[in-house]
Image (spheres, helix red, strand yellow):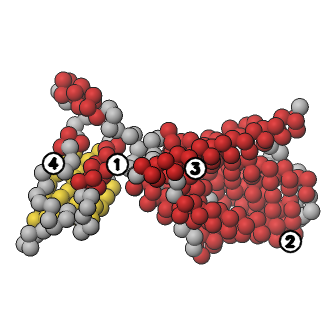
Amino acid sequence: MALRLIKILPPKKIGKFDDWVDKDDVIDYWVEESGKGDQSIHLLVDVELTEKILQDLETRFSGYEDYRIVLFPVSATLPLQPPDEKKDEKEHSNTEKENEGKRLKRISRDELYVKIEEGVDFSWVYLVLIALSCIVAANGLIRDSGAMVIGAMVIAPILGPNVGLALATTLGDKWLMKRSFRSILYGFSLGMALSIIMGMMFHINPEVYEINSRTTVSFADIALGLAAGVAGCLSFTRGISAAVIGVMVAVALLPPMVATGLLLGSGMYELALGAGLLTFTYIICVNLAGVVTFLLQGIKPKSFSQRKEGEELSRYAIIIWLILLAILALIIYFQYF
């Protein structure tokens, strides 16, 4: 069971810690007081109940400004928590019934937002990593080296902006959406430009497997793109390292993008069109799967007005992605039949 430590620096005039949160949601808690009369409260909680507790605290502190809530990941705690099967059967049954509607089976919305926001930041480091990953991927494609292509996937920072776009669409967050769009646009533009230049400089053999396998689109590629989007977003909500799940998303986006640029630079426009169509297919599938995954995970804006806007934006985004995916499916169908 993953744990989180919530540190609360409450408003000065709110009084002592009493019924701010439901004690059944907390594994343990302790209060520290300074010589000046200030207090800090520490709550040890299950990660799946973090969002509910944070919402309870924000509701309790509404109207105050002089407070701070800090969330820490917990690597380990002693003594160990006893497994559920070792608890009293009756107590366990009652607790499960009470918490059944509370548990979200994911990290809190606030923690998720911060994690994804970090991967959306546009900086010179982001551009350098894009450039390096494209150079490595291009070498892997030209030399028909799967190991080099995998190495490019590991360093490619493509995951963050795409997941950020899906989360922004789900929450109706226009600020995060603009940042995600900017990072995607600049990143793909830089990668495509470098790939075209390398395609003009080096001899490109379209018969090698690593290139040839990315010049056509099939229904299996749609399944791969959807799987990559679900894996990326679902793993984010479970708190799994972005370095691991980034490879899953990069496998769908980076190699075909670089292959498109290489083929364009070498003048093989028909093959480049197939690789470009494959890249576009993966972009659609990753973002569609991301929005749907976040919605199914119960990720919603905080306020009612934001929730309404987020629901409308999500609905429009899903419709647009589905229409584009249907068009691509028709292209694939007539291509093979």
**Which of the 4 quarters of the picture holds residue 285?**
top right
Q: Residue at x 52, y 45 (%)?
A: 311
Checking the image for residue 201, the label placed there is 2
Mark 1: which secondary structure? helix
Q: Residue at x 28, y 34 (%)?
A: 99
Camera-nearest residue between 299 and 223:
299
Task: Locate the C terminus and report the quarter of the image it occupies.
Answer: top right
Q: Nearer the viewer, mark 4 or mark 1?
A: 4
Bin the neighbour count of mark 1 within 10 Å (Cα to Cα): few under 14, some 14-19, many 20 and up. some
Which residue bears the numbered disc 4?
19
Q: Earlier in the sequence, mark 3 or mark 4?
A: 4
* In this rendering, position of residue 223 left or right of residue 123: right
Residue 255: x %, y % from top left: 73, 55
Mark 4, secondary structure of its residue: loop
Amino acid of disc 1: Glu
Image quarter of the N terminus: top left
What is the count of numbered marks?
4
Residue 210 position (above or below residue 68): above
Specify whether 39 is left or right of 53. left
**Label 3 packing within 10 angstroms: few (<14), some (14-19), many (20+):** some
